[in-house]
Image (tube, grey):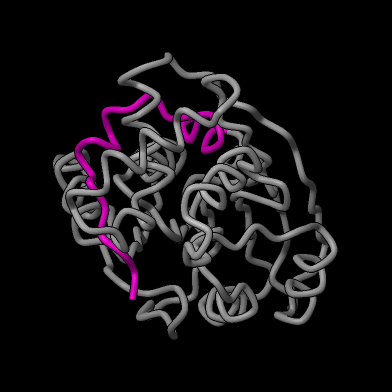
């Protein structure tokens, strides 16, 4: 079951996701009339950018979080005529009833434990020759935070799925994608020490862990993780992918 998010706080933070989104959209070759699926669209930052690239096209904005989609609707209130908003789980067959010309996803897939299923579900709604461009946390992502979590909460649930190049390549081929470009790229993000760092960790990084803790233990948990970081840096490593849906 997809988890809910504090969408308003998420949208107020200085997210590196904005730059990741621009890079990911830049991997697409568009005429401006396509139908593009934004898989794990969140609050719609990349959906908005996609609409700018698709003056004669449309976007299917799909996410598992009702709060995120509510924020997206507010952000795109004057352009919803070209957006189909769907709340759905990427681990289940997608309720998308048209074959899309492209799929993009930014900072979403590392929250999903089964990439084989995700790739198959995406392929099922893509026309032959459709483009896939995504990025997410990859092997080695936020290693310092993972280490701190294991120190503070040794029995913490496994939240993230940080895949590597070899496994991702194999999974994409099995899901009938071709023309693969799969890379891992370090991309550390420096934040301001104090409230900004704590809010970022609590909202963007640790929300799923906090869901498992009693409410009166959550602030102390975030503080303990923050104190263990050697500097106010989130040591991101991004898995970046471009591929084509096989077939003619």
Across and down, in percent, residue 26 comes to: 62, 37
Taking the image as shown, residue 188 lies to the left or right of residue 196, namely right
Q: Is residue 62 magenta?
A: no
Q: Residue at x 30, y 39 (%)?
A: 220
Magenta residues?
A: 1-22
Look at 70% across and 60% down and name the residue there.
163
Q: Examine the rendered structure and indicate whether residue 138 appears above or below residue 74.
A: below
Give whichever of 170, 72 is nearer the camera: 170
The image quadrant where one finds the C terminus is bottom right
Residue 44 located left or right of residue 121: left
Viewer-closest of 29 and 148 = 148
In which image quadrant can residue 166 be found?
A: bottom right
Magenta-span inclusion, residue 17: yes
In front of the other: 235 or 213: 213
If the image is split into quadrants, where does the N terminus sit?
A: bottom left
- Residue 114: where, in percent of width, then height? 58, 76
């Amino acid at each position: 079951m997809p988890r809910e998010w504090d969408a308003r706080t998420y949208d107020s933070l200085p997210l590196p996701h904005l730059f990741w989104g621009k890079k990911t959209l830049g991997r697409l070759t568009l005429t401006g009339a396509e139908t593009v699926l934004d898989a794990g669209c969140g609050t719609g930052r990349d959906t908005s950018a996609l609409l700018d690239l698709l003056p004669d096209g449309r976007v299917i904005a799909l996410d598992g979080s009702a709060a995120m989609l509510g924020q997206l609707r507010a952000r795109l209130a004057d352009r919803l005529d070209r957006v189909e908003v769907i709340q759905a789980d990427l681990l289940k067959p997608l309720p998308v009833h048209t074959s899309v010309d492209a799929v993009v996803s930014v900072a979403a897939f590392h929250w999903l434990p089964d990439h084989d299923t995700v790739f198959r579900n995406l392929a099922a709604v893509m026309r032959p020759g459709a483009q896939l461009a995504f990025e997410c946390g990859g092997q080695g992502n936020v290693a310092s935070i993972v280490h701190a979590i294991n120190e503070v909460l040794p029995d913490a649930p496994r939240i993230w799925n940080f895949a590597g190049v070899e496994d991702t390549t194999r999974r994409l081929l099995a899901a009938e994608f071709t023309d693969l470009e799969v890379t891992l790229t370090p991309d550390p993000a420096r934040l301001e020490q104090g409230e900004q760092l704590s809010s970022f960790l609590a909202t963007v990084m640790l929300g799923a862990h906090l869901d498992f803790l009693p409410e009166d233990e959550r602030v102390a948990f975030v503080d303990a993780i923050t104190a263990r970081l050697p500097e106010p840096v989130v040591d991101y490593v991004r898995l970046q992918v471009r591929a084509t849906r096989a077939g003619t």
